[in-house]
Image (tube, rainbow, N blue to C red):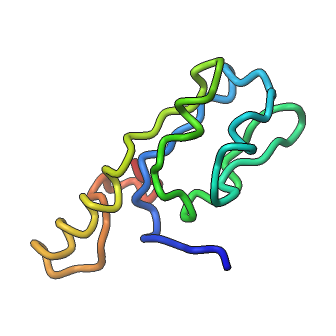
Amino acid sequence: MKHKYLKNVTTLNLAPEKCTGCGICTEVCPHGVLSIENKKAVIADKNSCMECGACALNCPASAINVEAGVGCALAVIIGWITGKEPTCGCGSGECC
């Protein structure tokens, strides 16, 4: 069963111009968040990211950035404070 976390709160970012298409990120991601398309990594399912950081730590091209554990926790705290649906508060709809 694939777990989903809070929507649009992960800090996961990918710089496709840096990606070499090695595929290591797809091998180490426990939830299949990344895939390879046209010889480059793409974020296939951002909302399944648990921010473990395995992809970023193993990317030899430094094309992936994620602040391990930050997005979901921040979203929950903001939700509690505002009494609204959890969100990271960036306002763009594509956090962070």
Residue 78, above or below 17: below
Q: Which residue appears at 77% of the width and 21% of the height?
A: 20
Q: Quadrant of residue 32?
A: bottom right
51 left or right of 26?
left
Position of residue 6 measured from the top left corner of the image (x, y, whole percent): 42, 71
The answer to which of 79 and 31 lies nearer the viewer is 31
Position of residue 10 measured from the top left corner of the image (x, y, whole percent): 43, 54
Residue 29, above or below 15: below
Q: Which residue appears at 52% of the width and 39% of the height?
A: 13
Q: Quadrant of residue 19?
A: top right
Residue 68, above or below 59: below
Position of residue 9 measured from the top left corner of the image (x, y, whole percent): 40, 59
* Picture quarter with the N terminus: bottom right
Position of residue 55 measured from the top left corner of the image (x, y, whole percent): 59, 38
The answer to which of 48 and 15 lies nearer the viewer is 48
Residue 37, above or below 92: above
8 left or right of 40?
left
Q: Which residue appears at 41% of the width and 52% of the height?
A: 95
Q: Which residue appears at 45% of the width and 51% of the height?
A: 51
